[in-house]
Every structure is written in C-alpha cells, then in structure tokens.
Amino acid sequence: MTAVFSDTGSLLVLTFMLLLALIAGHWIHALSYERRSANLPLATKDHSLGLRVAEKRAEVTALEEKRSKLDQEISDRDRLIAETASQKELLDRLRLEYDQLREAKEEIEKTRLEAAEMAAEYAKVSQALEAAREEMAAIERAKTAHELEKLDYQRRIEEYTDKLGELKDEGGQIEAGLVELRSERDWLLGLRNEVTALEAKKAILADELADLEKRLQALDEMQTQHAELTASIRMLSQQISEKEDDRQRLAARADAISTQVAEAERQLSRLADDKQRHDQLRQEVDRMEEELQKGLSHKSRLEAQIAVLEQEASKLTDSVGGTSSSAETSEEIARDLLVVPESLKTPPTTGMAYRTEDEALYNVASYLDKRGLKFSDRILRAFHTSLKINDHAQMTVLAGVSGTGKSQLPRRYAEAMGIHFLQIAVEPRWDSPQDLLGFYNYIEKKYRATDFARALVHMDPYNTSGLSDRAFEDQMLLILLDEMNLARVEYYFSEFLSRLEARPQIKEVGEALKRRDAQLPIDIRATNALKTTLSVFPGHNVLFAGTMNDDESTQSLSDKVLDRSNVMQFSAPVKFEQLKPQDRVDQADKALPFKQWRSWIKPSNSMGDSDRARTEHALQNLADIMKSCGRPFGFRLHEAVMAYVANYPRKNNLVEEISAAISDQIEFRILPKLRGVEVEPHDSDLRRLAELVRQDLGDQAFGDEIEATIDRGTNTGLFSWRGIQRL
C-alpha cells in the first residue's frame, strides 16, 4: 500500500515537472518570436499596412476620376451659362447703341439750332461792320477836308510871313509916312491875332485828328474780330457738315437696327404662335388622355362590378350546393379603401376658389390673426414656399419645443387656403409602411385600411388602384405626421420618401410607365390561392408636413430625411402676448384647385441673371464651409435651394427678399446638417457661416444667433441649432 502511494506521488511530481517544462518552452518561444519580429525589416512588418494604403490609393484614384467628370460637367454648364450671358450682352449692346444713336440725333438737332443762332448773330455783326465802314469813310472825308484847310492856312501864313518881311523891309523906306505905318501896324496886329486864333484852331483840329486815329484803330480791331468770327463761322459750318454726315450714317445704322429689331419681333411673334399651337395641341392631347383615363376607369369599374356579380353568383351556387366560402374576395377586402375619409369632406367640394397667390397669403394671414395665432409674415411665406417645392423637397418638418404652434400652423393654413387636411398621430411602435397604409388581418380575414390609404386612393388623379371615381383629382390634400420622430422615420416613412422622390416631373406625369416607380403597393391578399396587390400613386396634389419635438423621448432625423426636407425650427417665444381670438371664424368654403396651385410654381430657370448669380455665389461659399466641416452636400440640395429662391413670394421684387429666401434655406437645410458637429475644430468655419449671413445676406439677427449658438457650443462641445424668433 505504501509502495502504491509512493508511485502515485512520483507520478504527480513527474507530471508537474512536465507542465513547468511546457510553460517555460512556450515562454521562451514567445520571446524568440518577438525578438525575430523586432529584427524583421519594416517592409515585412508593414505588409498589411501597404495593402491598406494601396486600397486607399485606388479609392482616391476613383474619387479623382469622379471629381474630374464632375469638373467637366461643371465646365460644360459654365460654358453654357457664358454663352447665354454673351447673347444677352450682345442684345444689351445693340439696345445701348440704339439709345446712343437717338442721343446723337438729338445732339445734331441741337447743333442745327445753335448754327442758326450763330448765323443770325453773324448777320447782325455784318450790319454793324458795314455801318462802321461807312462811318470810317465819312471820317476819312472829314480828315481830307481838314488837311486841305490846314494847308490853305499854312500857305496864307507863309504869304503873310513873306508880306510881313516885305513890310519890314519897306518900313525903313517909309519912315516918312507915320500914319501909314501905324495903320499898317494895326493891320499887322490884327493879322497876328488872326494867326493866334488859327493856331488855337490848329490845336483843336490836332485833337480831333488824334480822336479820329483812335476810332480808326478801333475799326481795325473790329475788322480783325470780324475776320476771326468769319473763320469761326466757316469752321462751324464745316463741323455742321461733318455732323450731318455722322447723322446720316447714324440714321442708316438706326434703320438697320430697327430692321433687326423688327425681324426679331417677327420671329418672337412666330414663336408665340408656335407656342400657342403647341399649347392647343397639348390641351387636345390632355383632353384625349383624360377621356382615355375616364374610359379605363369606367372599364375598371365595370370589371369590378362583373367580378362582384360573379362572386355573388358563385356564393349562391355554393349555398344551393350546401357549401360555403371561408375567404372574402379581393373586392370585398378592398371595399374598405372606398370609404371617403372625413378629411376630404372639408372644405365642400362644390365650387372652386380661383385667386392670386398674394390674395391667398393675405387670406391665410388674416385667418391666423382672427384665430389668435401669432406667426410672422416671414414664417408664413417660408412654410408656403416649402410646400410649393415638394417636387424637390418632399417634406416640410416643423421642429422645436412643445407648445409653439407647430401643429396649428399647417392645420389653419390648410383651412384658410381651401386645402383638405389629414392629421396622423405617429406612434412609437411604428416600424413599417403598413402602419401608414394598413394591412390584411389573417385572423379576421379583412383588410384594415387607414385614412392615409383611403385619402391617397381618392386623391390619385390617375385612379391607379381602379377603385376611385377621380372626384378629387383637381383638389389638394395636406397630410401632417404629428410628432413624426416618436418612432424612427426611416422605418415607416423612408420607402415612402423614395417613392415621392421618384415621381416624374409634372409635364411627364401623364405617362403611366414613368409613374410606375413612384406607385405604392397596398397588400390586400386574402388567401394563399388569391394573391392580389393594389397600387396607388401619390400625386403632386398631396403635400406632406411633419412635426417633431426636441426632447429626450424623440429620435433624430437621418441624412436621408434631412436631404429631402425643409426643417423649420421653432424657438421658444421671447415674450408671451395674450391674443384674443374672435368668437366665430369661418374657414374657406371652396376647395383650392390643383391647377391654380401649380400656376403659382415657377421653374428654377425663371430667376433673373442677377438673382441666379447671387444665389449661386452664396451656395458656392456654403459648399466650401460645409466641406470644411465634414458635412458636404450634393446636387439634390443645390436644386432644392434654387427652386426655393425662385418660388419665394416677393412683394416688390426687392433684392432683400432674395437674401431672405437664401437665409431661410441656410436655416432649414444647412444648419440641421451641422447638428452634432464639434465646435472647437470647426470654430473658424462656423464663424465664416455667421459672417456670410451678416455681410452677404444682410441678416444681422440670424448671424448673431448663429454666433451665439457657436459660443454655447464651446461649453457642450457640439453645435446644436435651436431656432430664431422671427418678430
């Protein structure tokens, strides 16, 4: 017994030693592997890293090729824009040249009048010059007479002087005759007085002669001026002749431009006639298609009636034979869809409300005020425009704290507009499209339709299900998903959004093949043997809105929903005002026609060049900022913003209203995508956004609120937009 225990102990000791040896060997092997790994070259150690780098480089190359293609497409678009701008510039240049020609013609007429005035002045100067010449001739004649008289006086003085000399010579000889000498002396004294008088007269004549010389000099100066004036008149006559030649050339050019304008007007008239003929043909085609659709609808109803009669006959046969049917027919199951929901009974369908867009918005504002609801004109126009562009943005989401009127605005808007309104309360358990459209209950053997599905069937303008009488095809319906983010929107509404986005454009929606991808299937299968699926088309006459509360019980929206939505953030009120509603407020008693609604919608290319350039410039800056923040956007958002700006109601066609529309889109489309962005690494980019809003768009309050949101984000670390109170 002792030997057995001894052998057993030896065996245990041997086993323990073997385990220690194995552990030591494993440890030594691990150390040697690490030593060998450390001694391996870097290329061998980083082999997997090299493979990953190669994969990333391949991805970068693919992205570069994609970017090159996008750059080429952008270049082609810019070239087309440049060609359009050059054609418009040529037209503006021709118009400017025509205006310049008209101004030149007016200048020529003015020059003619000035030339006539100068000719009259020239005649007056010529008369004055002729009078001056006659006066100068008279002066010359007077001067000649005075010179002759002066010569006669000098001759007489010389004679008298000679005679005086003779008398002096004879004085010595006639000493004896004193009486005669005295008388001679008296005569000589008288002669001397006469000579003195002549000298005085000579001085007077000299003064007159100096005065005449001055007048002659003045006449010479006048003659020089006359010569200069004559040269100026000749120069003006030459200029008038040149102007007349220019006028003739400009007149010829104006005639040529008038001919071109007339030809353009004729071409425009021909195009208008062609468009009118095209519209007439289109109306005829639409009428024929409408008649065809009515015929098909009538055929479908007849086929449904035949099927019902056949089923009733089959039931009667079974009852006579002692058998019974355990499953309802598809027509009986779908009968629940034919029930007209209460939402389509208000407003009454009798009569149509045709009016302008401005009148409709005024009626809505007045209706809200009478109801005691305070919404700014900016919010009302933003909500209205968001619904108008449902081709580009399929949802209008009203977010914010509870109790700010998010549900009231869509309801009262629809009541004032004459639009049918259906409110659907979203439940947290919703997880599939069947929660909206209904489903077949296999236990009850019945299809449970929802008001949502019934409304879509009756609003379908093309009777895709074959169950509708198309009584509501030219009316409007606004569907509100109340508290839509209580459940994940992607679960129950994501497929629906994709179908809405797949709808063809309004000019192509009449083709059944193009509507196929947008049709929603409604499952009404009754048994395994009878498998029937109906489809309904959500037309452009159905608008979608949703409300969501910002609290811990709600889900956030995904990028897919944000890209297809305008998110209007309702902030908490700054101050509380007590508004008293009126005792009785009548809502619209006529339905708004869908055709009238479509007449308010404008294509994106309807914007003017300056408005388009302003919007494109803002979008380019936004694209740079969003790319730097790691939240880039694509063509879908770009086209949606362009459509919003083009359709924004403008009271006086002011530039400020275009800026307001762009500011709205930054708030509704850009800021929701920035939610959750880290503030510290993107602080400069976010402040660039605030500066863009303030400087380029002139929205000081909005820019300040973005700045305040950035400052608050420095505490939490994340950017979280909570809206702005528009007063």
Image (cartoon, rainbow, N blue to C red):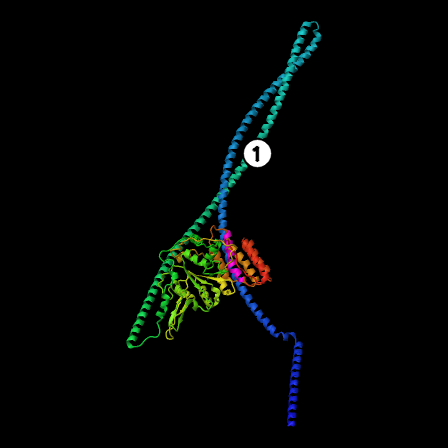
**Residue 541, image x, y percentages:** 41, 60
Look at the picture and state if 10 lies above or below 159.
Answer: below
Give the total number of marks visible in the rendering: 1
Q: Residue at x 57, y 22 (%)?
A: 141
Q: To which quarter of the image does residue 707 belong?
A: bottom right
Query: Which quadrant: the N terminus?
Result: bottom right
Q: Residue at x 42, y 58 (%)?
A: 414
Q: Residue at x 51, y 52 (%)?
A: 656
- SS label for mark 1: helix
User: Which amino acid, mark 1?
Assistant: Glu
**Residue 319, image x, y percentages:** 29, 75
Please rate how many residues cluster around mark 1, counting C-alpha atoms within 10 Å: few if below 14, some from 14 to 19, many from 20. few
Q: Is 235 placed left or right of 175 in the picture? A: left
Q: Is residue 560 magenta?
A: no
**Residue 625, image x, y percentages:** 56, 60
Taken as a whole, is the magenta stretch helix, strand or loop? helix
The residue stretch that appears in magenta: 655-673
- Residue 461 appears in the rendering: no
Query: Is residue 219 or residue 62 the one in the foreground?
Result: 62
**Residue 42, image x, y percentages:** 65, 74
Query: Is residue 15 or residue 173 the one in the foreground?
Result: 15
